[in-house]
Image (cartoon, grey):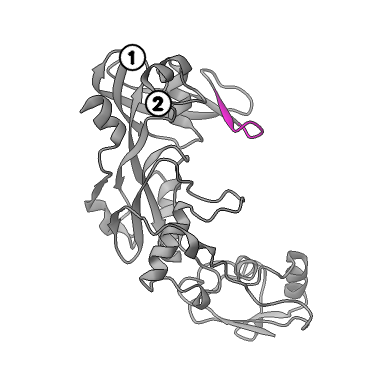
């Protein structure tokens, strides 16, 4: 038998989702069988797969002794670098400035240093994150950036904040502004452009077309030219949709690729200026959350990253 007392970071989720995270060694097929046989109970009573957990609930799992129910906490994040550039932090969230060359997540490969690893280490050292006291939660990123894109990334310190921020992003209540340098002039000084986007997962590349097509999803990107030094332009980008590689692919599609972009950009221009990663920064973040949100206090903030090095270099 295994017993769990549900805390604030566990409540609100379905019992099957909780068990999957709390007992990762338990096969899902067995978990569903245990629920059907009433061998997983909430507060001593039978439950359904969709039953939601509340703070203080007691979840009991009756399982044979030979089945492992011990959760092994991954502590590899302790091997990561202690360097974290914090732009904003409170009891619920932490917003950091991710440097170029650092992965947001491990992407399934064994890595000892990623952005989320550094954040976990930072919170662990502050005694704000204790893996042994958590059954199902770990600090998590609410957004991510490509390895060679720098700028603001938000992470949640608790499960309630994670749910709130993720829902806000889905609902369009989190507004992101990027700065980039394009390798060619933009068609206009400012515009909101639309197109259709499809990701090729096998090659990790996206395609952009101007007309609706099967498998393509609509995208919307705003831009404003801040300064020009032909053929380069310093550009502010507003994302209205958030598809993979949207900024890089959409700007390349209209003939103004991001300088340094080796996937969608102009290789000859990149070589001429000696830059080999995209000049792109998630520069500004503003929240517009409903007043009912426990995080609505963030609405008064406009959070900016430090001016990126590429902006200083080409447009000082």
What residue did someone put label 2 on?
Answer: 275
What is the crowding at mark 2: few (fewer than 14 residues within 10 Å), some, or many (at least 20)?
A: some
For the C terminus, which image quadrant?
top left
Residue 225 percent across, percent down from the top left: 27, 22
Q: Nearer the viewer, residue 139 or 195?
A: 139
- The residue depicted at 38 percent of the width and 34 percent of the height is 239
Q: Is residue 154 magenta?
A: no
What is the crowding at mark 1: few (fewer than 14 residues within 10 Å), some, or many (at least 20)?
A: many
Q: Which circle marks residue 163 in the picture?
A: none
Q: Nearer the viewer, residue 241 or 184?
A: 184
SS of the residue under disc 2? loop
Q: Which residues are magenta?
A: 200-207
SS of the residue under disc 1? loop
Image height check: is 188 above or below 39? above
Residue 109 percent across, percent down from the top left: 61, 50
Image height check: is 135 above or below 115? below
Q: Earlier in the sequence, mark 1 or mark 2?
A: 1
- The residue depicted at 73 percent of the width and 80 percent of the height is 39
- The residue depicted at 61 percent of the width and 65 percent of the height is 17
Residue 178 visible: yes
Alpha-carbon distance for marks 1 and 2?
Answer: 18 Å
What residue did someone put label 1 on?
Answer: 185
Q: Is residue 201 magenta?
A: yes
């Amino acid at each position: 038998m295994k017993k769990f007392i549900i805390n604030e970071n566990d409540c609100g989720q379905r019992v099957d989702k909780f068990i999957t995270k709390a007992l990762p060694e338990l096969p899902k097929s067995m978990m569903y069988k245990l629920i059907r046989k009433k061998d997983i109970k909430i507060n001593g009573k039978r439950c359904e797969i969709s039953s939601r957990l509340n703070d203080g609930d007691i979840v009991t799992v009756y399982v044979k002794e030979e089945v492992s129910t011990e959760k092994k906490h991954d502590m590899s994040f302790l091997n990561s670098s202690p360097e974290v550039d914090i732009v904003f932090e409170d009891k619920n969230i932490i917003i950091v400035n991710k440097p170029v060359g650092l992965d947001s997540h491990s992407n399934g490969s064994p890595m000892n240093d990623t952005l989320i690893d550094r954040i976990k280490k930072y919170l662990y050292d502050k005694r704000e994150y204790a893996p042994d006291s958590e059954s199902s939660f770990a600090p998590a990123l609410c957004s991510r950036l490509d390895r060679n894109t720098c700028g603001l990334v938000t992470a949640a310190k608790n499960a309630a904040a994670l749910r709130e921020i993720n829902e806000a992003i889905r609902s369009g209540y989190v507004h992101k502004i990027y700065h980039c340098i394009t390798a060619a002039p933009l068609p206009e000084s400012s515009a909101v452009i639309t197109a259709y986007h499809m990701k090729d997962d096998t090659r990790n590349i996206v395609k952009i077309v101007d007309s609706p097509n099967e498998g393509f999803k609509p995208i919307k990107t705003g831009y404003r030219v801040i300064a020009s030094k032909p053929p380069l332009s310093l550009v502010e980008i507003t994302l209205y949709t958030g598809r993979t590689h949207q900024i890089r692919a959409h700007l390349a599609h209209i003939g103004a690729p991001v300088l340094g972009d080796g996937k969608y950009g102009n290789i000859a221009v990149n070589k001429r200026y000696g830059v080999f990663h995209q000049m792109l920064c998630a520069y500004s973040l503003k929240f517009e959350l409903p007043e009912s949100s426990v995080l609505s206090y963030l609405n008064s903030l406009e959070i900016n990253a430090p001016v990126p090095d590429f902006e200083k270099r080409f447009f000082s």
